[in-house]
Amino acid sequence: MLNLLQLDLVSLRLLVLTADCENLTRAADSAHMTVSAASKRLAELERVTDCTLFIRVPRGLQLTPAGRGLAEHARNILEGAQRMAHDASDYANGVRGHVRLFANTSAVIQFLPKDLTMFLASNPHVRIGLEEALSDMTIQAVEDGRAEIGIFADNIPALRLETRPYRRDRLVVLAPQDHVLAQRESVTLADTLDYDYVALNQGSSLLRRINDAAGTTGKILKVRIQVSSFDGICRMIDAGLGIGILPLGAVHPELLVSKLRAIPIEGDWASRTLYVGVSDTARLSPEAANLYSFLSGLE
C-alpha cells in the first residue's frame, strides 16, 4: 500500500501541471524547475505509486488511466492544502471560526446578501464559506458533513435534518408587458399552461414545484427553454421566448418598470417557505450554532 508520507506537494503540483499541458518542458517552466529535475520527480512519483503515469508521444506526454486518476486526486489534495493555508492565515489574523453554508438560488439571490451582512457586522471574526446549490444537493451536503448549515425549499424532503423556517417568498408569473396575461390582476396556474414556459434546468426545486402543481390541473407544463439561473429566465422572457414563474424577490425591480410584468398567482402552492437545516445542533461549532440561531430567527 502507498505510504502517503512519501508524497510531497511539489511533486503533486508538478503532476497536475504536466497533466494539464501534457508537455514536460512547459510543466517544468510553470513549476520553476529544470526539465531534468521535473523528470526526476515524476519518475520518483511513478516509483512510489508503482504506476505508469505518462506515455511519451511525438508531441509530448500522454496520460495513462492511472495518470488521469492520480492527477485528479492530486488536485483535491492541493486544494485541501490551499484551504488549510487560508484557514491558518485567517486564524493568525483573528478569525475565530469558519462556517460552511450551502443554500439554494432563491435564498442566495433574495435574502442571504442582506442577512449575512447583518450577521457578520455583529460577528466580524467569523468566516462563512457559502456555496450555491440545488435544494436536494444542499440537503445532501449537510447530511454528508460537507456543510454545517443548509437552506432549501419546503418541497424537498429533509427527514434526516433538524430544520427551522428561514424565510417565506411568493411566486409570480413573469411575462412581457405586451403579453395577454400581463393585463390580468392575477392568474391561476391553469391559466398559464397554454403558453410556452422558460424554466430552470431539471433538478431544481422550483421546477419540481411547478410541475407538481400543474399535475393537479390535468395539464402539463410546456417548457420551451431551460436555463440555469433566474437571470437567464428573465432574459429569455424579455426576448419573447415564453413566460416563467419566479419568486418576486428574485426579479430585478427595474425590469418590472419597463420590460416585464409580475402577475400574482392564485393558490396556496405559490407561497413557499425556505428552511434552514443542520444535521445535529448539539454537534455544531459555536460559530455555526450562532449563525443557525440567527438565520432561524428572521422569519
Image (cartoon, grey):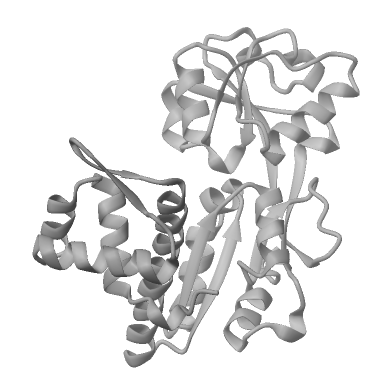
- Give the residue drawn at x 12%, y 52%: 25
Q: Where residue 98 sits in the image (x, y, percent)?
A: 50, 79
Please tell me in which quadrant of the rendered image residue 196 appears.
top right
Query: In the shown orientation, is residue 71 left or right of residue 214?
Result: left
Q: Residue at x 75, y 20 (%)?
A: 187
Q: Relative to 175, say whether 123 is above or below.
A: below
Q: Position of residue 11 (x, y in %)?
A: 29, 69
Q: Is residue 232 left or right of residue 199?
A: left
Res. 18 visible in picture: yes
Give the residue displayed 12% in from the left and 64% down from the top: 36
Q: Position of residue 178 (x, y in %)?
A: 52, 9
Residue 188 in sight here: no
211 left or right of 36 in image? right
Residue 15, placed above or below residue 124: above
Q: Nearer the viewer, residue 186 or 123?
A: 123
Name the quarter where the C terminus is drawn: bottom right
Query: Along the line of sight, which residue is nearer the eye, 178 or 133?
Result: 133
Location of residue 274 by image quarter? bottom right
Of 47 and 112, nearer the camera is 47
Q: Is residue 214 above or below residue 21?
A: above
In the rendered picture of this protein, how many numbered marks are placed on residues? 0
In x, y percent, where is residue 172?
A: 66, 31
Q: Residue at x 42, y 23 (%)?
A: 258
Whether 20 is drawn above or below 294: the answer is: above
- Image quadrant where one finds the N terminus: bottom right
Left or right: residue 99 compared with residue 212: left
